[in-house]
Image (cartoon, rainbow, N blue to C red):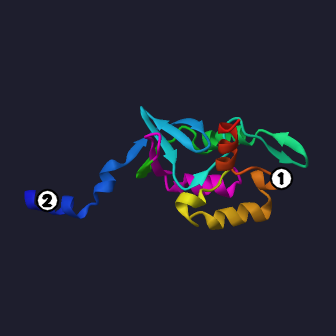
Amino acid sequence: MRILIMIILTLVPMSSFADTIGIPRIVDGDTIHIGKTKIRLWGYDSPEQKQTCTIKGKFWKCGQAATEHLKTFIGDNPVSCVEKDRDRYGRIVAKCKVGTLDIGAEMVEVGLAIPYWKYSGKYYIQSYKEARGLGRGMHAGTFVEPWVWRKIERNK
């Protein structure tokens, strides 16, 4: 029995032991906390809480919309996350799911986030093309990429 356990432990990747699972508190459209663990969701960037976008020349609170959609999508369900990296603030950067559903794919597909090209390459490209093509969420009007918006805000 002990040999079987040792064999299994050597075959299971160490990253699977670093998973974080739990009911999250939603901070914004791409950040959650599970207990005291701060997690930046991998692969996409959503508008910041105070960020606005425009549709037909009218402002709307796309950052708040992203946060609210993430809250609704997750609901009271547990989230499972696999760590991919750490960001400059020390947060875990993780790919997370609700059941079998990829949170990043959902957020990009509904147009309340865009792929974070700099870090994820073309990972969510199909979801992005669908959202853009159908004019969903931010793609219904104009917006500043979240990473550009943050830089502008820092420089004010």
Q: Which residue lies furthest to the front in this view?
A: 155
Q: Earlier in the sequence, mark 1 or mark 2?
A: 2
Q: Where is residue 148 in the image (x, y as percent from the top left)?
A: 68, 49
Q: Where is residue 94 in the image (x, y as percent from the top left)?
A: 46, 50
Residue 156 falls in which quadrant of the image?
Answer: top right
The foreground one among 113 and 89 is 89
Q: Which residue occupies 51% across, 45% down?
A: 40
Question: Alpha-carbon neighbours of circle 1 within 10 Å: few (<14), some, or many (≥20)?
Answer: some
Q: Which contiguous range is marked in magenta?
A: 87-112
The residue labelled by disc 1 is 141
The foreground one among 51 and 3 is 51
Residue 124 visible in image? yes
Residue 120 falls in which quadrant of the image?
Answer: bottom right
The residue labelled by disc 2 is 6
Secondary structure of residue under mark 1: loop
Question: Alpha-carbon neighbours of circle 2 within 10 Å: few (<14), some, or many (≥20)?
Answer: few
- Under mark 1, the amino acid is Gly
Which tag is nearer the camera, tag 1 or tag 2?
1
Secondary structure of residue under mark 2: helix
Q: Which residue occupies 82% across, 54% down?
A: 140
Q: Position of residue 110 (x, y in %)?
A: 70, 54
